[in-house]
Amino acid sequence: MDRIWIFYAVLLAASAFALWRGGAPERLVGLALLLAAVSTQVLQDDMPIRFAGVELKVLLVDVALLGVMLAITLNADRFWPAWATALHILGIGAHLARAISPDVIRLTYAVLAAAWSYPIIVLLVIGTIRHASRIRSKGWDLDWSRQDPTVR
């Protein structure tokens, strides 16, 4: 259980950093990740039956997060959201693997569904650092690909 609280602490710190120093894509992803983590914690099954079958409520949270991340990826003037979205799709793949083959071991399903969250947080932090660096060096940084560069 300690690893879960460590994950939440790291996620909270990364999201706070993104809200403080990030552009709109970083802030939105940080908030979406926090909301998804809280939703997952509230909606997932009780411990004795957790990951015994497809965690449908968690899958729905993951699909909703995927929709948000896809929208950000398609509109952001950044490359890191594409990597984060791809990693999140791998996590959704764990749900599909469990649905296709119920023989998948519970622990394997749990690890595959959650393991991609850590590199996504790292990408959020890196994206925030790079955004802050561009602001320092150029004085501005576009958030969205369709944004007029003359409007800051």
Image (cartoon, rainbow, N blue to C red):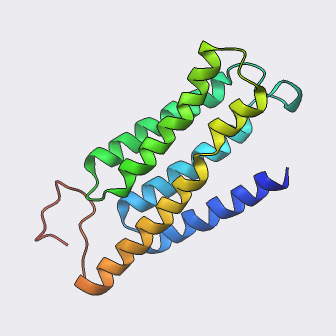
Q: Quadrant of residue 106?
A: top right
Query: Relative to residue 27, is residue 48 drawn left or right?
Result: right
**Image x and y of residue 109, in percent:** 69, 30
Outermost residue to the right: 48
Query: Relative to residue 31, is residue 11 drawn left or right?
Result: right
Which residue appears at 53% of the width and 71% of the height?
A: 17
Q: Quadrant of residue 40?
A: top right
In this rendering, is residue 139 above or below 51?
below
**Image x and y of residue 11, in percent:** 62, 59
Query: Relative to residue 103, is residue 120 drawn left or right?
Result: left
Which residue appears at 73% of the width and 38% of the height?
A: 42
Q: Quadrant of the C terminus?
A: bottom left
**Image x and y of residue 21, in percent:** 44, 74
Q: Nearer the viewer, residue 127 or 28?
A: 127
In this rendering, is residue 76 above or below 135?
above
Which residue appears at 36% of the width and 48% of the height?
A: 82
Which residue appears at 16% of the width and 54% of the height?
A: 146
Q: Quadrant of residue 145?
A: bottom left
